[in-house]
Amino acid sequence: MGTTISGETTAPIQEGPTNAALQARREAAVPRGLGISLPVFAAKAKGSEVTDVEGKRYIDFGGGIAVLNTGHLHPKVKAAVQAQLENFSHTCIQVTPYESYIRLAERLNAIAPVRGPAKTIFLTTGAEAVENAVKIARAHTGRPGVIAFSGAFHGRTLLGMALTGKVVPYKVGFGPMPADIYHLPFPVAYHGKEVADTLEAIETLFKSDIDPNRIAAFIIEPVQGEGGFYQAQPELMQGLRAIADKYGILLIADEVQTGFARTGKMFAMEHTGVKADLVTMAKSLAGGFPLSAVSGTASIMDAPNVGGLGGTYGGSPLGCAAGNAVLDVIEEEGLIERANVIGDLLVARIKELQASNTLTGIIGDIRQVGGMVAMEMVADGDASKPDPDLTRALVARAAEKGLILLSCGVRANVIRFLCPLTTSDALVNEGMDMLGEALRECVAERSAG
């Protein structure tokens, strides 16, 4: 019998291995270092719904970790990739270039939150974009040092994990780390860490550890992703911009998770009133196809010598075709505005749970930047008492009910919401109904146990 996704009956899932059988094969064939949060194997996906190999339907509140702002297999993105496949799949941009790469670069140059005329290079992954942004910053400034922040996530490559502000699981056993990387506390008012403390820590760093004239760049997420969906306050970004300008340091905005309408702006930097020198992008740039980018001030982007930037698969024809289609969809379907609507709906439903008598003190903080929403799980309403056990239990129980949820945070106690921006109100509410049921069951079972 066929499955139903968004009211359409799809072709029956072919008889085949079960989730359990595939998980056993995965454990035998794939290293344990590749973690999987949900041992459910996808067979089909469309819009905001996924069907597994056993025919069970799931509402997707994770979006492939922020990759699917335009949803699974958006018709326009799918059609653009199919059309490109009729021409060619790969030539390598450094051998025989193609128009779609140039057109997408031109479009990003026009909207990237950077100073002055911009240029863009395309790569494949977010980590690769981060690595290249640092290379460009070092080439432009002639300096080695980079300052990142606690709780940051910038990738799993050697430089990416060095910049990442979380040891477990990203850095354990992989040292030594590259030199000239420094971390500062990221201000989170909910945890008693203020912007003034961070700005003071920068000046302390310059007095005790490194001459500011040896720092090439600050790199910061306008809203921390893996770190817990904490927003960089406008005054923090303004302070960083002022310090950067004072010492000739570049400001790199990592918009890998926050870009392409997720936060109710095309880029999260637009909330801050500050422009960066370089911006890294990936994830929802190409609607599920591997593509990343670095956009930046043209004179800075031109600093590396010819041949110093590139990569065999960077800016693939399929990725560029998808990226151009994604920009069309965001504009045509009003996804920037839609992000705010979805975010408001999610927050309203979370507040209902927060106010419930049976869930008193469980949800400690609710955060929203457009459609980028999080709730922090604590005990007794106390910010100093994270509840990672309940967070893990909630993710697992929600999956049993048919809802894909993601957790995050340095303390592993944050539920993050990244449903596609094409998700209907009805599906958002259905998913939140599942979440509410799952949370009440988890709390009741713990109380009874």
Image: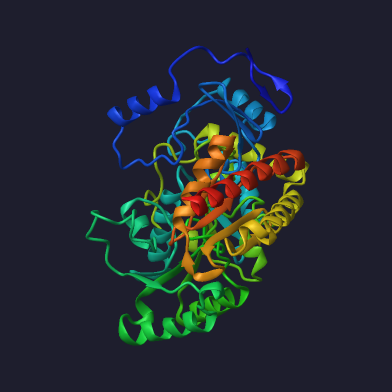
Q: Please report the residue visible at 56 percent of the width from the left and 41 percent of the height from the top.
A: 398
Measuring from the top left, give residue 255's x and y in whole percent.
Answer: 55, 56
- Image quadrant occupied by the N terminus: top right
Q: Please report the residue visible at 44 percent of the width from the left and 74 percent of the height from the top.
A: 185
Q: Is 207 positioned to the left or the right of 154 in the image? A: left
Q: Is 49 positioned to the left or the right of 168 in the image? A: right
**Do we see residue 121 in this rendering?**
no
Measuring from the top left, give residue 380's x and y in whole percent.
Answer: 54, 67
Q: Nearer the viewer, residue 423 or 333?
A: 423
Q: How is the image coloured?
A: rainbow
With respect to residue 327, does 176 lie above or below? below
Total residue callouts: 0
Measuring from the top left, give residue 327's x and y in whole percent.
Answer: 67, 43
Asked which quadrant contains residue 330, the reply is top right
**Do we see residue 189 in this rendering?**
yes
Measuring from the top left, give residue 379's x and y in whole percent.
Answer: 51, 64
Q: Please report the residue visible at 42 percent of the width from the left and 68 percent of the height from the top.
A: 150
Asked which quadrant contains residue 357, the reply is bottom right
With respect to residue 279, does 57 lie above or below? above
Q: Is 137 positioned to the left or the right of 188 in the image? A: left
Q: Nearer the viewer, residue 432 or 221?
A: 432
Residue at the far front in the pictured view: 448
Asked which quadrant contains residue 67, the reply is top right
Q: Nearer the viewer, residue 320 or 219?
A: 219
Q: Nearer the viewer, residue 392 or 439?
A: 439
